[in-house]
Image (cartoon, rainbow, N blue to C red):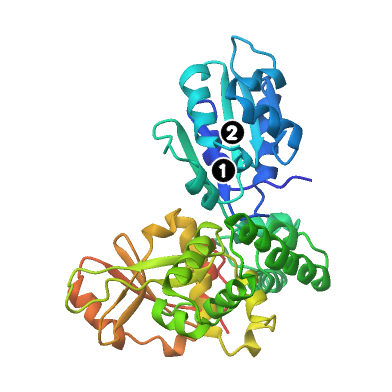
């Protein structure tokens, strides 16, 4: 069964434009399912559609010889045909393949392709394909999608109204599962905690190892150790010099590892927001995981939130994940921090947020300077129990 994804509606808006479409994102986030749903949508409208997975070596061999060999796999017609290509990064030169077909055959072919991560696209896409493509990044499920994957669509009707005790309990249970095990589709569809954990560990080990191997990284042990450190230091400044000393690796190697981690969509690194070079940080980023379940995998900690010692980090990373849904791109999200330690966790456009787990501890003391320096930016204090309502509209009773 294929479940609806929020991004489908955005893609459908440009599906019939000439520009090609590329779906990028971490492994196992549902790119193949989205390709199939788009293909089914077009076929229902009577369009000619074809699907090829380039993990199939026979297709790969044909298309690597020349882009026009696509017409050995589909009939050449004067009307537009829709070609879905999964794992396009396996082509020797995907940018040339797409560029040539777009420039010379776009009246006949519209290509919708997926790539395992933008890491591959960066390395192999020597041409930016500017003006020839739409790039959509596919992340793990948001909470509304998670609810649909759990076949609890009636919960969505509870938004913006007084919620009964019955639905309050259901929403809380799902919200905590979403936080503890994460939101990879395969994990969300798992029927019990043991299977969820098994599937999450498969993503955290086997699939990340594929990223490591494809990136040519030899020291897998140090790479995984770096991810564990980042999980432990979620929301803290990423200091290359400290990481180099801790892991016994050259700074250049640490930089290379962080590049692969970022481009494989394992973590995001957000940059400082600043105006005053002398007083505000301008270099070191902060790190957040795209999926909280994956962070828990690297920590080896699946305890319920009430028992955890890292509640603040969980709340901050959760807020980042939900804010990313609004921003669309992690590069748009910033943080603010001065040299003397005054800080605001997130800045996006004309809004800023300071995140605390406990609402009783939300104090403005370390953030007062920000409102003085940036009076045009609205600053809000957010506790964990406010996040669900802020992003999804569920008005829950707060404990």
CB-based contact (under 8 Å), mark 1 and mark 2: yes
Under circle 1, the secondary element is strand
Which is nearer the eye, 4 or 359?
4
- Name the residue located 59 percent from the left edge and 78 percent from the top edge: 225
**Residue 143, percent from left and from top:** 61, 61
* 71 versus 95 height, above or below: above
Which is nearer the eye, 269 or 273?
269
Query: In screen coordinates, is 131 left or right of 69?
Result: left
Image quadrant where one finds the C terminus? bottom right
Residue at label 2? 112
The total of numbered circles placed on residues is: 2
* 290 versus 327 height, above or below: below
Query: In screen coordinates, is 121 left or right of 279?
Result: right
Gap in angstroms between the C-alphas marked 1 and 2: 8 Å
- Label 2: few (<14), some (14–19) or many (≥20) C-alpha neighbours in 10 Å: many
Would residue 157 be visible to someone looking at this image?
no
Q: Residue 272 is drawn in which quadrant?
A: bottom left
- Name the residue located 70 percent from the left edge and 44 percent from the top edge: 33
Query: Outermost residue, top direction?
Result: 78
- Name the residue located 46 percent from the left edge and 84 percent from the top edge: 245
Q: What label sits on residue 386 in the rendered view?
A: none
**Residue 205, percent from left and from top:** 70, 67
- Label 1: few (<14), some (14–19) or many (≥20) C-alpha neighbours in 10 Å: many
**Residue 75, percent from left and from top:** 69, 14
Which is nearer the eye, 384 or 260?
260
Looking at marks 1 and 2 on the same chain, the residue that comes earlier in the sequence is marked by 1
Query: In screen coordinates, is 149 left or right of 391?
Result: right
Q: What label sits on residue 23 in the rendered view?
A: 1
Under circle 2, the secondary element is strand
Which is nearer the eye, 308 or 240?
240
């Amino acid at each position: 069964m294929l479940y609806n994804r929020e991004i489908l509606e955005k893609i459908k808006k440009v599906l019939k434009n000439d520009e090609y479409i590329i779906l990028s994102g971490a492994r196992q986030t549902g790119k193949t399912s989205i390709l199939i749903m788009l293909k089914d949508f077009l076929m229902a409208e009577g369009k000619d559609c074809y699907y090829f997975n380039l993990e199939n070596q026979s297709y790969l061999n044909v298309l690597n010889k020349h882009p026009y060999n696509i017409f050995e796999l589909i009939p050449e017609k004067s009307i537009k045909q829709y070609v879905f290509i999964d794992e396009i990064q396996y082509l020797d030169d995907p940018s040339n393949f797409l560029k040539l077909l777009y420039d010379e055959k776009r009246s006949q072919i519209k290509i919708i392709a997926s790539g395992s991560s933008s890491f591959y696209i960066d390395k192999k896409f020597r041409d930016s394909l500017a003006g020839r493509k739409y790039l959509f990044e596919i992340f793990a499920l948001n909470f509304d999608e998670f609810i649909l994957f759990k076949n609890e669509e009636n919960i969505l009707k509870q938004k913006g109204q007084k919620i009964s005790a019955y639905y309050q309990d259901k929403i809380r249970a799902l919200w905590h599962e979403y936080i503890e095990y994460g939101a990879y589709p395969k994990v969300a569809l798992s029927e019990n905690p043991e299977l969820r954990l098994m599937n999450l560990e498969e993503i955290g080990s086997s699939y990340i190892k594929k990223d490591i191997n494809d990136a040519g990284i030899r020291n897998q042990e140090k790479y995984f150790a770096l991810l564990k450190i980042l999980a432990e230091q979620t929301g803290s400044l990423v200091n290359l010099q400290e990481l180099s000393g801790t892991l016994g690796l050259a700074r250049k190697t640490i930089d290379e590892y962080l590049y692969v981690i970022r481009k494989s969509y394992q973590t995001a690194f957000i940059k400082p927001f600043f105006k005053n070079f002398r007083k505000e940080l301008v270099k070191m980023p902060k790190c957040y995981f795209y999926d909280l379940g994956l962070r828990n995998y690297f920590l080896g900690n699946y305890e319920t939130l009430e028992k955890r010692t890292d509640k603040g980090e969980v709340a901050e990373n959760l807020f980042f994940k939900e804010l990313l849904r609004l921003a669309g791109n992690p590069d748009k999200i910033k943080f603010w921090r001065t040299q003397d330690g005054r800080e605001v966790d997130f800045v996006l456009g004309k809004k800023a947020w300071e995140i605390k787990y406990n609402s009783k501890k939300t104090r403005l003391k370390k953030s007062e300077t920000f409102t003085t320096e940036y009076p045009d930016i609205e600053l809000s204090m957010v506790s964990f129990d406010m996040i669900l309502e802020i992003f999804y509209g569920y008005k829950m009773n707060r404990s």
